[in-house]
Every structure is written in structure tokens, then in C-alpha cells.
Amino acid sequence: MNSQHLQTLLHMQALPPPSPILSGSLRSRKFSNTTTNVRKTSLFLRLCNKTFDFGVRGSSRGAIRCSVAKEEASEQEQQHQLGVRRAYPFHEIEPKWQRFWEDNSTFRTPDDVDTSKPKFYVLDMFPYPRCGKNGEFWVFWDVNGYLCCLFGSNCCSGAGLHVGHPLGYTATDILARFKRMQGYNVLHPMGWDAFGLPAEQYAIETGTHPKITTERNINRFRTQLKSLGFSYDWNREISTTEPDYYKWTQWIFLQLLKRGLAYQAEVPVNWCPALGTVLANEEVVDGVSERGGHPVIRKALSLFITKQPMRQWMLRITAYADRLLEDLDDLDWPESVKDMQRNWIGRSEGAQMEFPVLDGDGQERDIKIEIYTTRPDTIFGATYLVMAPEHPLLPSIMTPDQRKNVEEYIDIASRKSDLERTELQKEKNGVFSGCYARNPVNGEAIPVWVADYVLGSYGTGAIMAVPAHDTRDYEFASKYDILIRWVVTPDDKKLGDTGKAFSGEGVVINSSSKFGLDINGLPSKEAASKVIEWAEENGKGKKKVVLSLLKFPILGVNYKLRDWLFARQRYWGEPIPVVFLDGTRETVPLLETDLPLMLPELDDFTPTGTGEPPLTKAEYWVKAKDPVSGMPARRETNTMPQWAGSCWYYLRFMDPRNSKELVAKSKEKYWSPVDVYVGGAEHAVLHLLYSRFWHKALYDIGVVSTKEPFKCVINQGIILGEVQYMACRDPDGNLISAESAETIGEYIQEQVPEEKVMKSGDSFVLKDNPKISLIARAHKMSKSRGNVVNPDDVVSEYGADSLRLYEMFMGPLRDSKTWNTSGIEGVHRFLGRTWRLIVGSPLPDGTFQDGTVVGDEKPTLEQLRSFHKCIAKVTEEIEGTRFNTGISAMMEFLNVAYKWDKHPKSIIEAFVLLLSPYAPHMAEELWSRLGHSESLAYEPFPKADPAYLKEYTIVLPVQINGKTRGTIQVEETCTEEDAFQLASQDEKLSKYLSGRSIKKRIFVPGKILNVILDRENAKVGDSQ
């Protein structure tokens, strides 16, 4: 059938036609072990409503399709499919209760709460709504850069959320509902991080004001979230683009400016000519912009765009380096996140040493390279130096024959962010400068290399490389065949080339020279002190006392952390509330009473081409006056980065309508800090670090009462697409096994539908040709792979409660998981069985009777024991965010309950409450059918009675004539006769007892049953 599909206009690689043999194929050709793939930035797409036949890629079940491969079916066919599959009437229940919650503001947190009650503040990381217009598709990203939504604006119901996105939202919603039922005041808000570069780019391309598309997208995204039953307090909804909100973002900036924490400086930046703006390090990937894939250059703007220096706003985060580091210890955060922040801050203590540069004849020149080292004890093992590509001395020391290579390398390095350059896992590379320097302690001439893993902003921008005792240096030296010399050994043991560096402290070896320095046999710390003392006495170096990093001296300490570049040359962002006096360019802050400084309306958002921001075009707005003297002035035309609004939004949620202060002290004191903050790990460093910095600055001026904003941080895992199976072909088109494909170098991959695959041992093979093994791999969901699963399809076929339940049941919240559509069928069956247990079987026409089939009888002791064990397990697992095992406990209980003849109302009601945080729509409907007129949202969560958790049965050993022949399960109060009867009925023991004459029985309650047979029977029993 003919279908309309989407055509990608940016960065979409054309794919060859599908194979006639393997239908639904998707090829990627591999040359020299390098796969040619759609570039990863291809998710930044302009998608137009044009015909382009992508074909159906990958398998899909039922009504669930990949977003770019959905086959259209008639409404009648869809309704027929849904009617067959529905295990309970979720299509009626879910809209009903969503309307009820909204009409009754069920989840609204009052402005004035009872502060004698405990509080629970649970927060999701800010989502970011991207842009679209009629006839095109919209894309949503959250603060983590996580693709979350793709839908057509001209459809009544769009394609919906990316199924990976609701994972964290469902987890926080379970916690919020659980805590409400435990009697907590719960703050569970939602808002929008709506300023940013993607919206502005869309405005440039379409001529539609970003405010219009942003508001439209927010409305749509809000609807999508509500359709999944999330219990947000929508009365507290905020957007960073609202003047009432960014008034306080500007206010915070003014407080930072007053305290010297905001300043202007000329610094190297990531400049993207195509986007016309400076990008943060995290917005640059592989030398191109993350959004759009445009080339990025790292230079000082004043050197290549304008004749006058273009100064950038900076925030002095380095002033808080020690506090940001020290306060990590008290946080309930993943250790991996804390380690990343520690590494990003990079605190170290060390010394500066001077290495004279040598000329072509080996004589010392007047140039000395100062290096910074944290391990002076290893200086005898320094076999080369490394300079940062941006080091100011580099042009004067590179040799003519190496100049071209060095300059090419510098150009490549300038396109990388600092984050990429210092990535520990990346392969180290560099280029020889052509010159040598002298190691001051032993007089050796060692080569000077240039490598981007050294940053010009850290230390002196140059290091002495000791490959035997530094992992990065070892990898680099091994790659370029540079001498590796061992100078430290643990416990005076000999070290050979073990294939890796020894980076620990120990005893120094191979470290003496004719220049009067001998540190052999000394412990590392003592040796380091002796090297520094020798260097100071001989004028070769000095202890690192003061390091000036952006003119901010730090005593005896160095940091990798650099001040935060806070200016963007774009329109769609918060205006910076300062003016510059005409003539003197003196910076004058606006009065706080003049806030907010509103963003002017502009029709032309295109880059100026000069590096000047688009706001310079708003001449009527740019012209201003000094708020105090009235002198002519010009407004700042840079805007704040997107990070600004998301740094403090958690505070505004506490008091969102306060026009007089950022947050009332009483409300902040009650709600702070955020108890649980859930989001992806992508911004584990920057977003969290910036928020902590602003929070500490606000703490210092008395705005907040806690030192940290987020008590507990949870990073949810990624949901991968369904497993894709790929067959390999050689250049002649012949099918080959996956194992042999790597050896031939060039091959073609084709996707194989799941129905053509079978498992064989640990591998997957073609059903029709089991000799052909396949590549089986799950990838992160993306449109370019065609493996995006749309939750609207899941909700349509199975219901929102099934989606919520499945996302929690897939595995531990923090782990990555692979989507499997058949898995959701299992949790849907569980919900259907729950419905039928309480409501009864469907009537002949497929509908269900009103009310329930439960009774008012008193539960038995065994029923109470089974259920209270379930309560205890579910409660424990929710509190530990082990939601998958909590669901398992409810499934196990349901299996037990189906064996009961009667189902007491008291137990069934409590079970509905137990289920409600996970499947709120079904729970509300069942609660109503059980005779309740109010929502269950604030009903007390069931509590396990310890009396029913105690094990009342024991394992009793049974002996025949003194020999243990087996065991039986008995009650603790079991009598001798009861124990003997159970033993006689036991399959294993009965062969010893059946028809035998018993001489006597010895019974010790709770300990043992010993049956003594007469002598003749004993022989027969023993022979058996």
C-alpha cells in the first residue's frame, strides 16, 4: 500500500534498496573494519511532510511500530484488533480518571501545607520542548539530550513519546504516590526548559517566532504526560521563557555580579560560524555542533571576527571548587557521578619545574618550558614533554620541518571541546614538535610533543610525561615508541614492562644524577620533597605556591575546573541585565526594581556574520540609559546560556507565583533540599555542577538554607531498541557467517526479520540456513536506525498502566534495558487477571458487570500471611527503588489469590492500594467499584503486620530406627500424632512405614520424630 513517510533533509545518508532475499533490510557497508553509518548528529533533523519510501525496518508486533515505519491501518481494523486484545476496559478507565484528577486538582500541593507533617520533594530533570510547525514533525529533548518525543502537529494524536522517556517519570510518580499515601506532604512538579539554541535555529529556518512554537509544543507535551497518568501538580508549572520566571534568573546574575562571581574576559571559546554563536564544551561533539553537525572552531573571538576584542561573560565557579569537591562526600548520589564531578574539578597539589629548550646543536636556548607536576618524585622517569596545542610558546619552538604537521594538528585540536580532549577512554594522539628540552635533574635531552590531552588552561599548559607511572603517558609512549623508564616500585620490588603503568606511590629507583640529586630508596612523598628542595636551591623550579588561572590565585593547589563561560551570541535566551556606558564601556547593572529585562520581539534571528549577537538588530532596545545617572548606554546583546534557567528551577517550584522574592524563606526551609532527583547520566557533571554552584552562592547570601540542592540523585538507565539481527554478505553478495565477516574486511550487513531467526546455542542463525550465524545487537533508540517504539501505540493497544508497569518490570531502574514488545503482553495479562479476580469474568458481549465479586467474609490466617508478606515486600522494594521486584511480589500474590475459594474485601481493598502507585488508573476504578466515593490517592498505604510475617512452620527431621530418612513441613505447635500422620503421607517416608509394625515413637516437639519398628520390619525397611 502507498504511505506517506518522512524525508530527512539534514545529514541523512541514502540507503541502498532492500534485498529481495531478506525483506525489511537495512544495510551498512564496512570497509577496513570501519562501518559507514548515518552520523550520530542526524537526530537533529528538519523533517518534512514529503513522500519518501523508507520501507519497514525491523519487526513490530500488533499495533506497535517503529516511528518512521508505521503502516497505516483502517480505524475499523484497529478497533477490531484492540477489541480482541483488551484484557480489561482500560480505554474507558484511563481517560475517565485523568479527567477526574484534573477536574478535582487531586495532586495539587497547597501553598500553605501542614509543616508538622514530613515532606517529600521528588523531581524529574527539566524536559526541553523542541520546535515544529504545521505539516512538519516536532521533536522533544530533555535536559539530558535524551530524544523523547516525535509527533506530527497536524494530527489529532501524534506519534507520542519515545518509550525511553517515561522510564524516569514513572519511577518518580510511583515514589510520589507512595509517599502521599504514607502521609507525607509531596511536592511533585513539572515545567519546561524552553530557551535554547534549537528553538532559535528553527525560527531562523521557518520564520516562525520561537515563542509561538515553544508554547505550542509545551501544550502538546503536557497532554502527552497527562495521558500516562503522572501525578504532577500542574498548578506549579513553570517555563524558563516566562518573564515572571527569568526575572529571578536575572536577579541571581546580579547577585553574582555584586560579589565578583560574574566578570568579563577574553578567553578561547567554541565558535560555530554556521550557528553564529559560542557553544559550551558539552555542545560540541567530534569538532562539530551537537545540534546540526556544523564545524566548530576554538579560538578567541577577538582574533578572527572583529577588530575589537569580544569579551565574554564568565562565572567564577572556581571560587567554589573546594566546597564543590568536599560536599560531595555527604550526598546520596551514585559514586560514578561523584567521581565524574571530582575528576572535572580535578584538584591537585604539585610543583613547577623548568625544562630548557635546546637548539639544533643541543645547546640551551633562552626559552624554558615550565611544567606542572603532581609527582616530582618521578622526574627521573620523564622521557618526553607534552605541550597543549594552544600553548603560547609552541610557535617559537617548533622546527621548520615539523611546522606544517604541528599547525595541522593544532587546527584539528581547536575543533574539539575540552571534555572530548580529556576523555579518559579516548585514544591518545599527538605530533612531535621537532625540538628537544633538557631534563634538569639528569641532563638528558628529551623530545617535546604536542598532544590535545593536555589543556592550556590547566597548570602551565605543559607536562613532563612519565610513561612508566601515568596511564595516559604510557598509552602515548607505547603508540609512538618513546622510552619508558621505571623509577618507582611498590615495596622495593622490581618492575618490568607489565603492559601498564604503575601510578601508585612506592620506593624510588633509578633516580640519581651527577648534579647532586639522589633520591634512590626514598618513599615517594619524601623523594618529592627532596626534588622540590633541590630545584629551588638550583633555580630549576619551585614549589607550586600560587597559580593564576584567569587571574584567580589558588595557594598550593591546581584545578582542572575552569570558570563557566556564560555568554551566547543568540536571541532565544535570557537577556543579561547590564548596560555599558557610551564612551567608557563601564559595566552598570540594572536596578533590581527594573527586572525583568524583557526580550525584545525580533523578526530577523539570523546570525550577523560578524560575531555580534542578533539582539544588536533591535536598535530601539539596545539604546538605553544608565539607571542611576541617566547617561547614554547600550544594553548587553549576548544572552544567557540554556543552563541558566535550569540551574535553579527546583527552588521556584516551591513558590512559583511569588512576585516579591525568588522563594519565600519559610517555604524554602520546609521543602529543601530535593529529596530525590531523577534523570539520565548525560549531565551528571555539568548540569548538576552548575546547579550546585548557584545553590552555594545563594546559600552564602541567605536565600537558601541548605548547602546542597539535591539530597539523592538517581540516574535511570537507557531503554534500548528491540534486538536487531543482521546477516552479512561478502562483496559478491554471498551470505557469510558473522564470525568470518570481520576477517574479510569488506562486507554488507542486512537486517533480518525476527521471524526468520532462531537460537542455536549461544548464537542466532537463519532458520533457512542454520550455518549462517547473525549479528544480534540492541541499539539506543533513534530514528536513523528505525527502532523507535512509540508509546502512543503501546497505550492504544495495552493502556498507560501496562506501559508504566512494563517499564518498571523490565529490570532495575538504573540499568540499561532492551525493549521487547512481548514483555508488555506479560504485564498486561497480570493487570487483566487482577481485573477479573476482583470484577469477574467478562460477559458474553465482552463487557464487565458493575461492582465486584469480592465478599465480606473474614480472611483466614493463611490469607493474611500471604498478603502481609506481599505488603512487606512491595513496601521495601518501592523504598529501595527496586520497582521490578515489587511487581514480582504482587504477581506472586495474585497467583496465590487465584487459588482461594473466596476473596475477602478487606484483603482485596488493601491489594488495590498496594497496586495503585504502579497502575493508578486501574486502581482508582477498582477502588470506586469496591464502594468508595473518593480517590484513593491519599488513602493510607497498607502496612505489614509483623505478626503475620513470622514463619509458623518448621522443617522436622524424621528418623526410622535412628537413621534420618527425610523431613516434613509441620506447624510449630504440631503434635506427635499429627507429625506421624504427615510422615506416613510423605512419598519418601511412606515406604518405610506403610504396613509396618511400630514398636514405639520418640517425638521431641520442634526437634525430631524417631519411629522405632520391630526387628523384623526394621530389616525389611532397611532393605528397601
Image: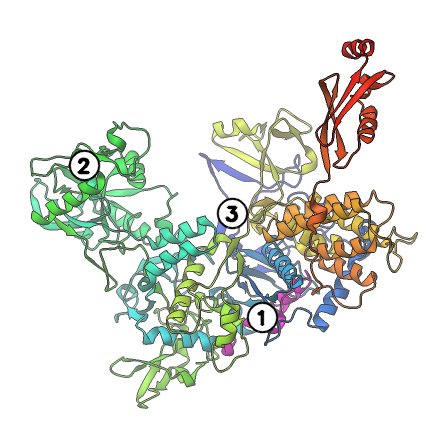
Q: How many residues crowd around disc 2 within 10 Å: few (fewer than 14), some, or many (20 or more)?
A: some
Q: Earlier in the sequence, mark 3 or mark 1?
A: 3
Q: Position of residue 891 (x, y in %)?
A: 73, 45
Query: Between marks 3 and 1, how big is the CA–CA gap?
Result: 57 Å
- Mark 2 = which residue? 522
Q: Is residue 452 left or right of residue 951?
A: left
| 2 or 1: mark nearer the eye | 1
- Mark 3 = which residue? 38
Query: Which three-letter amino acid code belongs to the residue tagged 2?
Result: Leu
- Mark 1 = which residue? 116
Residue situated in front as seen by the camera: 564 or 290: 564
Looking at the rendered image, the quarter that the C terminus falls into is top right
| 3 or 1: mark nearer the eye | 1
Q: Earlier in the sequence, mark 2 or mark 1?
A: 1
At x 45%, y 76%, the residue is 248
Q: Earlier in the sequence, mark 3 or mark 2?
A: 3
Q: Is residue 35 left or right of residue 965?
A: left
Query: Which three-letter amino acid code belongs to the residue tagged 1?
Result: Ser
Q: Secondary structure at mark 1?
A: loop
| 183 up-or-down from 785: above or below | below
Tell me, yes or no, if residue 284 can be seen here. Answer: no
Q: Is residue 97 left or right of residue 711?
A: right
At x 77%, y 46%, the residue is 894
